[in-house]
Amino acid sequence: MRVNGLAATEILKEDHRLIERLLRVLAQAAGKVERGEEVSPTVFARALDFIRNFADRCHHGKEEDCLFPALEAHGLPRHAGPVAVMLSEHEEGRGYVRGLAQALEQWQKGDKSAARAVAKNARGYADVLANHIPKEDNILYPMGENILPEGVKKGLLEAYEGVEKRLGEGKHHEYIHLIEELEKELKG
C-alpha cells in the first residue's frame, strides 16, 4: 500500500532525509562554537524544537508506536535484535537531547561557557543519528518490507497519518521551512 506514491518505509526514509539535513546544521553550528565563532543560541533552540517534535515525537513516534509493534507481531522481537538496537539508539539520542536542552538553558541565561556543552551534545546527537539512520534504511526497513503483509503496511500508512495529525496541521511543512532557514543562516 502506498500513500502519495510512497510505501510505509519510504515515508520514514523521507523523514530521514530531512533529519539528516538537521544533523548537518547541528554539526556545522557545533563546529563554529568549537572554533570560537559566533553562533546564536537561537540556532540550537530552533534545532531542539525540530528534534523534539519532528525527529522524536513524529518520526520516532511512527517507528516506536506503529512500525516496531508491527514488526514484533510478525516475528522481530522488541528486546533483542535490530528493533532493540534501534530503540537503544533512540534513547541514546534522547540523552544527548536532554544534555543539549540543559546546556542551552544555561547559555540563554547568560552562561557563555555552556555553549561548549551545547556543541558537545549537539555533535553527540548528530553522530548517533548519522550512524543510526543507515541501519534503519538499509537493514530494518527492508526486513519490514519483506515480513509485513500488505494489509499491515496499509494500516501503518494510516497510523503514520495519525502521528502527523498529532504533530499538528501543516507542521511537517513548517519544519521543512525551519531547516531551510537554519541552512541559510549558517551559510551567511
Image: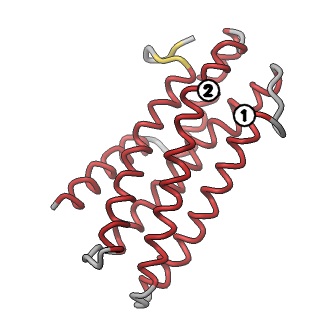
Q: As displayed, is residue 167 above or below residue 17?
A: below
Residue 124 got which mark?
A: none
* Quadrant housing the N terminus: top right
**Residue at the disc numbered 1:** 82
Name which residue lies at 68% across and 54% down. Answer: 91
Label annotation for residue 139: 2
Q: Position of residue 115 (x, y in %)?
A: 41, 79
Amino acid at dot 1:
Pro
Eyeballing the image, is 152 above or below 50?
A: above
Q: In this view, does 66 lie to the left or right of 137?
A: right
According to the image, what is the colour scheme of the structure? secondary structure
- Category of crowding for the residue at label 1, using alpha-carbon neighbours closer than 10 angstroms: few (below 14), some (14–19), many (at least 20): some
- Classify residue 47 by image quadrant: bottom left
Q: Nearer the viewer, residue 61 or 27?
A: 27
The residue at 44%/44% (across/down) is 19
Task: Report whether 37 appears left or right of 116.
Answer: left
Picture coordinates of residue 85, whole percent (x, y): 72, 42
Q: Which amino acid does label 2 sit on?
A: Ile
Mark 2 element type: helix
Asked where in the image residue 50 lies, by quadrant, the reply is: bottom left
